[in-house]
Amino acid sequence: MTLPIRRHFLARAIALVAALPACSLAAPPIPTSSLFDVKRFGAKGDGRTLDSPAINAAIAAAATAGGGTVYFPPGRYLSASIRLKSNITLYLEAGAVIEAVDASVARYDLPEPNEAGGNYQDYGHSHWQNSLIWGIGLNNVAIVGGGLIHGKGLISGHDKYTGYYTDKPDQPGEADKAIALRECRNVTLRDFSILHGGHFGILATGCSNLLIDHLIIDTNRDGMDIDACSNVRVTNCSLNTPWDDAICLKASYGLGRIQHCENITISDCLVSGNFDEGSLIDGTFKRSAPEYRSGRYGRIKMGTESNGDFKNITITNCIFDECRGLAIESVDGSHIEDLTISNITMRNVVNDPIFIRLGARLRGPNKPPVGTIKRINISNVVVSGAHVNHASTIAGLEGHLIEDIRISNVQIETQGGGDAAWSKVVPPENANGYPEPGMFGKAPAYAFYMRHVKAIEAHHVKVGYVKPEGRTAVVLDDVSDASFHAVNLRRGHGGAALFVLRGVSDFSARDVRGMPDREIPERVDALTL
């Protein structure tokens, strides 16, 4: 059955984002020069015929002619691997569906060998050819138009027998990505939708000058992974990813070398982990699957693959809707610096609204040294319904401090309901553990937990709770140069403290609700305020 294409629903999703600019939903005009209609090369678009040989023939003809537009009129095109070439645009007319065929019907291209880069990240990040649509080393490539890419026959890396993600195909000829691009330049992905994209809806590795605009991705694992890429703009996208991350920046060793992820902007996007798969695309926005309630993902994240650096990145004007919060993670030696996060709204986040982690997994050649995280500015953030077990967490390592963090104009309302006993527990260091909110157990504070941090400034911040809360508001452990100004916190029930300081020096609190101004230049090993 051909799936309905209902793009008008995007207006409803975007309406959730009050700060988003109005945008036209009209498709761009169909190019008329250098046009290669796939039906002229034998594609049927009838939902029964395997059309990838005809599609690849059209691409090859366009490439031989020096480039052109490969045009998909309305229809349902069953396909195995589609091989992109330079100077080619795939144009999916509204009503055109490229549907990934089951591997039992037709085999996809085999994954290419990758001995140099294949040992330090999972299998899915290390191969590109085993995909529905792929390109390697290309220039001037685009996929545009109002159609749909349906990864129906793609695998997600989920073992149906064990319930765990294996990230490897069960048999040769399977594919696990809707779109995979490696070391491509001048790439545009615009206006289409991806349904059920396998392990990755989009995997872009080592690409530069990449524009991802006005996409709808409604999928069973990662929405888009931007790995070791530079000069990237992600705008006006809506993503529903209940089982994995929505937008994920990475700097893996998949290319067989260290390459940075830098000069990235993410703006005007909606990320969710709470809609039933497919209901974002069809506009019904269903929320019926019970497994989402405890395990839903969504979110925007940096890491965990972090061999290269993350530099010069902005995230602005985005909504997190019933999913995980923002995560910034360096655990494989990455230097993360010069980040600006602003104008963010989060509703019913299921873990830490803000999670910044410097760890020591150190997965890479010759065991790289611990990285750094510094110069991060987070401002104009509104959060409601933050989960009781969590707080916003900034956690480095002993001897490896997170530095120069500024949090301003932030308002957080938590569920409340935390137990006073949780504040008495000192979380484990878990230096080499997988970085994820919850890795330290239940949060000892309801607002902020900060450990191994230098130069933290929080001003014009308000954090409250709904249900009675027994925990401390803020716990600082091994922190220096900490300034809290114009901060509105509520004491927990039973006389809980606003601040607990352990190994803290150069602490300043001014205009903090419920306590007098304090300046504590000397180190204090244990102090409750």
Image: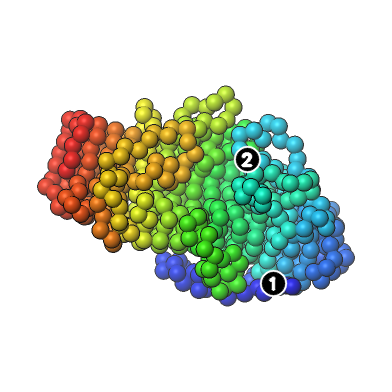
Q: Quadrant of residue 504?
A: top left
Q: Quadrant of residue 364?
A: top right
Residue depicted at 67% across the width and 35% down the height: 118
Label 1 – label 2 distance at C-alpha: 32 Å
| Depth check, front residue: 187 or 483 | 483
Rendered image: mark on residue 240:
none
User: How many marks are shown on the rendered structure?
Assistant: 2
Rendered image: mark on residue 3:
1
Q: In the image, 514: left or right of 88? A: left
Provide residue 344's location: percent of width, then percent of height.
40, 58
First in residue order: circle 1 vs circle 2: 1
Vertical comparison of 10 with 409: above or below: below
Residue 62 showing in the rendered view: no
| Depth check, front residue: 391 or 39 | 391
The image's colouring method is rainbow
Vertical comparison of 442 with 198: above or below: above
The residue carrying mark 2 is 122
| Amino acid on which the number 1 mark rests in the picture | Leu
Q: In the image, 526: left or right of 135? A: left
